[in-house]
Amino acid sequence: FASLCVAIEELGRVDQSMGITLSAGVGLGANPVFRFGNDDQRDQWLPDLVTGRSLGAFGLTEPDGGSDAGATRTRAELVGDEWVINGSKAFITNCGTDITSIVTVTARTDDGISAFVVPAGTPGMVIEPAYDKLGWHASDTHGITFVDCRVPADNLLGQPGQGFRNFLSILDDGRIAISALALGSARACLEMSVEYAKQRHAFGGPIGRFQGLSFQLSDLAVQVENAHNLTYKAAWLKDQGRPIGQAAAMAKLYSTEAAMDAARVATQVFGGMGFMEETPVARFYRDAKILEIGEGTSEIQRLVIARNLGLPVE
């Protein structure tokens, strides 16, 4: 898992959209099949997913249930030897590409919330028009509507009623990956800012000589180092097979807020040029905000951390 984080981090240094495509495709799309699928499901879907010949998508969020993921309204009813799915999903990455092969989705069943593999192109699964987003412009993001969407009974992923619980554990993995993406973004902003502060001259010398700017970059360097340590500690724990919930929440919270801080500082350092689309700083600024929202908001991460501390939070 740490190796995956290295790849995502390096992509994040250049373009978050490419980083999230990999992160969501492997960590969210393929991972549920790998962890909870049976041998037949793994043999059918994983070869193309893990080699990049296809992309997977992860359908948990709904229009009325983002942070409150347990408020799932999508329903699945077993009719004969098929599951019939009705409902909606929102903000789903990778679900509308030409190489999307599957969407793993949660839906309410008689046993609770279960998970299913829905192949791309299944009748009744309608991919809505792409969202017009603030950032991540090169990332594929759509809503999905299910209208009497039928999949074979064998497409149940894991045990009945365990889908929500299983998908929450997938989110722990995803939070580490998002931390790596945020780390790459923060590193890029720091590197660009330092270089610009050396080259840009004002008032008779490089602007990096001013403490008002150099101290901000010093603080940002500390944040980047801390984000690195938290991210790769969580990845190491994952690779060791140890509990990761608290470490993933801490890494996701700190790294994504560091990325937002880094983008803000970089935009300020670049001044007027930081507001221009011809410089990458503007894109990094637009892309950074979603990091604090997707796969669990900063508020949710603080709630998870507080609960793991044993605090009586609601």
Image (spheres, rainbow, N blue to C red):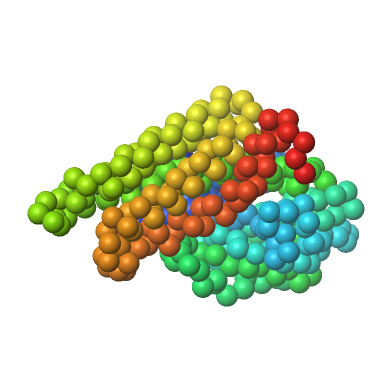
- Residue 77 in view, yes or no: yes
| Count of marks overlaid on the render | 0
Residue 220 vs residue 5, the one in the foreground: 220
Report whether 214 appears left or right of 186: left
- Residue 35 in view, yes or no: no
Report whether 180 appears left or right of 252: left
Residue 210 image point, x, y percent: 22, 47
Which residue lies most toward the bottom here?
129
Residue 45 image point, x, y percent: 60, 49
43, above or below 68, in the image: above
236, above or below 133, in the image: above
Residue 196 vs residue 32, the one in the foreground: 196
Residue 270 vs residue 130, the one in the foreground: 270
Rendered residue at 45%/55% (across/down): 288
260, above or below 241, in the image: below
Rendered residue at 40%/59% (across/down): 285
Rendered residue at 69%/32% (across/down): 308
The quadrant of the picture occupied by the C terminus is top right
Report whether 291 appears left or right of 281: right
Rendered residue at 69%/46% (across/down): 167
Residue 289 image point, x, y percent: 49, 57
Residue 44 image point, x, y percent: 62, 48
